[in-house]
Structure formats: structure tokens, C-alpha cells
Image: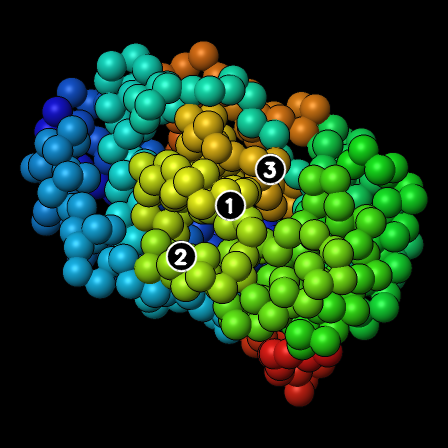
Amino acid sequence: MKIVDMRIHSIAIADPPLRSSYGLHAPYALRTILELQSEDGIVGISETYGGQAPAQALRQLRPQIVGADSYRLTGFLSPMVEGQGAGFERSQTYLVPGENPLDATTRTYAAIEVGCLDLIGKSVGQPVCDLIGGRVRDEVAFSAYPFYKHAGGGGEGDDVREDEYGEALTPEALVQQAKQMVSKYGFGSVKFKGGVLEPDLEIETIKLLRQELGPEVPLRIDPNSAWTVETSLRVGKALAEELSGGGYLEDPTAGLDNMAEVRRRLVAEGIMTPLATNVAVTSFGDIPRSIELDAVQIILCDHHYWGGMRQVQHLANLCKVFGIGLSMHSNSHLGVSLMGMAHVAAATPHLTYACDTHYPWQSEQDEVVEGGRVSIVNGCVKIPDKPGLGVELDYDQLARGRERYEKCPYRKRDDEAQMRKHIYPDWKRILPRW
Ligand code: GKR
Ligand code: MG
């Protein structure tokens, strides 16, 4: 099935002022929507990181894509994920995901792979999860993702959005936000973004979350490497009980050696809280050393930067062999990405935790999926009984996203710059901060 056209849409979507150790989310997050059209008029779609560089990388591949057979294309492009250099270490700590030049190629490949799978699925009348090995579940569980945040719902000028969750810069406010999110979407677990307030306040936040949500809701905290080894140990000890029973401690500190030291010293005290990562291990090349050091007990996959859905499935198998858990990472995204995440998760047997998603932070107004936002019910996304990813584009909404992008003064994500612009003029990302 020949691809006759490839369309790349750079869009901007409103994003609330969420905080992390990277800094502050900008009023708009940038995304790229890719369309691959076949000779018989079927359109396959995918969503990936936004801004200038991802769109440019896709544009550069256009001559290889237009005219290619959608069934064979990813085979021809496979050196992008499996060739020289592709397996090498790519771990990164300082850069925001999506801005790591070392995984730019796998990110580009992933967008094309998902677009081809959607196209093929729509052409043969099969959902993507059933093309990539077959589903092992019909519903995929996601976790709530509360953030400390400033007041505001995202957007700017006459495009400012309603602030659904309000300001949350204290443990109490964060817990309120989490409860609101859990009650709206029915999430059964909570991934909490830390690395923003003093560690003692973040410990208090987790303790309050446990108190309010009960022990049956697994809790995770991710300070994005903001802590020293000593602080990580202090937090790990203080939260030994709260992070047990299906929870984990994600990227407390930077680098595999430090993660390994935290693990070793926690285990020596009888604390078995697993350490998870989405920055110390971001490629197959990072895995041997991580295993050698026992630095990481859970890897967060993400088809957007691991090189697509089949690479995530390979990763899952490897994790299973080595007794490592698998969870899923996310960044601000719309429904096309959410469906991609749900399909790969549905067809990945060894997925041992509910997946992350930023989806509750985006609004209906920005959704480019026809029919509006994808539903999350009881914390789960159901695989629809439709071919491909199960979603189509709403072209009016896409055009609005493109207009917002044109008006946006930035072309990449830079949370540090946003922090300086809106909150503290001298702010710098310091790792470790505490
Ligand atoms: O959205 O600010 C954020 C997160 O910190 C995000 O950039 C991370 O990539 O969610 C991510 C994570 O788990 O590290
Ligand atoms: Mg993380």
C-alpha cells in the first residue's frame, strides 16, 4: 500500500503552569501531528513531540516516505532504531524529554511507525494492538498525575483557559487536586510529581495522600533527579511504607551510580521500595550497566522516544527476563498519543504498573481527535472496536492548533526559561537541589 502524501502539522495546546525540577510548563505545549496518506485515500496518523526540530526531522525523511510501501517502510528505516549507534547509551538527566538530541532519531522513527500501523490497521480493518501481536487486555489502566502548580489553566491573552484545578503549592492543595482528579477519572493509582518543594513538604504530601486515599491506592513520587543520594535515602526511609504495595520511587537522584547507591543503602536497611526511571535508562544501550549495578528495578517505557511500539515490546521482554518492572512515561499530549500509548500497552503482556498520562491537564478545546476527548473511565482507556488507533482527526481543531502554534513565540520546550519569565527571574535548574 503506497504512501502518496505525508503531512506534518505543528500545533500548540494550552498547558497549565505545572512545576517540576525542570522548571515551569509554558502556557502552551508543542506537539506534532503526522498524517500518512495511502494511494487509496486512507490516512494513518500519529502524534509526537512538538516544535521545530521534530517537524524538521520528519520533513527531511519525506522523500523516503512518499512513494514507499507502508508495510515495508519501517523495515527500510529500521537502522534508525537498530543500526549503528542506535543501541548505544542515550541516558539523559538534564534535558526535558523530547529535547534530548541523542534520541531524536528514535523519536522520528516512532512517529512514522505509529502512522504506518494506523494506516495499515485502517486498511485491513484491525486495531493497532492486534497488529502488533494481539491484545492481552482490552482496557489499559492509567494513573493520576498531580503536580504542584501555580494558578492558571494555560493559554494566553484572549485564549486563557479555565483553571480547573487551581493553585497547588502546599501539601493540602496538592492532595485536593489529586482527589479531584481521582474522582473525575476514577484512577486507581497516583504518580506525584515532586522535586519542587522542600523534601520534607513532599514527604508530608505523600503521607497526606496515603491518609486521604487509603492504602489500596499505590503511590509513586518522581522528583526528576532533584535530590542528592543522602536526601533520596532520607525520603526513601520516611516513605518506606507509603511507597510500598505497588508504589515506587522514580528518579530520586541523577545517574545510574547514584541510583545504585540509593538502592544498595535502602536494601541494607530492609527497605525494598523499587527505584524507577525514565531518564537514567532511555535506550537498550543503557540496560546492561543498569542491571550490573541493580540501579533500577522499574523502567518507564514510552513509545515516543524508545523508537516506537515494537521497541517497547522488545524492552518489555528484556525487562521480564531480568526481573525488572515496566511502567510507562508520558509528557503533555493529546488523544492521538493517548491512543498510541493505550494500544502498545494493550499488546504488552509484561506491563506491571498503571501508565502515566498528562491527559487530564489538557482541555477539550485543544483536542484534535474527532468527537472530542478520549474517555478515561475507572482510570482506564478502553481499546475501541475500531481499526487502527481507533481515532480520526478533526481538521477544524487541527487548524486551530496550527494557528496557536503560529502565534506561539517559542519553538521548543524550555521549562527553565519559563520559570525565569513567570516566577523567579534568576531561577536555574540545579541538580541536585536538595
Ligand atoms: O511534565 O513536567 C513534566 C514532567 O516532569 C515530564 O516532563 C517528565 O518527562 O513526566 C515526566 C517524568 O516522568 O519524568
Ligand atoms: Mg519521571
Ligand 2 under 8 Å from disc 2 Cβ: no
Residue hosting label 2: 287
* Residue type for callout 1: Ile
Residue hosting label 1: 324
* Marks 2 and 1, the one that precedes in the sequence: 2
* Marks 1 and 3, the one that precedes in the sequence: 1
Q: As drawn, is 14 to the left or to the right of 323?
A: right
Query: In the picture, which quadrant includes the C terminus?
Result: bottom right
Q: Residue at x 16, y 20 (%)?
A: 40
Residue hosting label 3: 353
* Residue type for callout 3: Tyr
Q: Quadrant of residue 142?
A: top right
Element type at mark 2 = helix
Q: Residue at x 71, y 32 (%)?
A: 187
Q: Is the residue under label 3 in contact with that under label 2 (CB below 8 Å)?
A: no
Mark pair 1, 3: CA separation:
12 Å
The colouring scheme, among rainbow, by chain, secondary structure or one colour, is: rainbow
Looking at the rendered image, the disc whose residue lies closer to the viewer, 2 or 3, is 2
Residue in front for this viewpoint, 12 or 124:
124
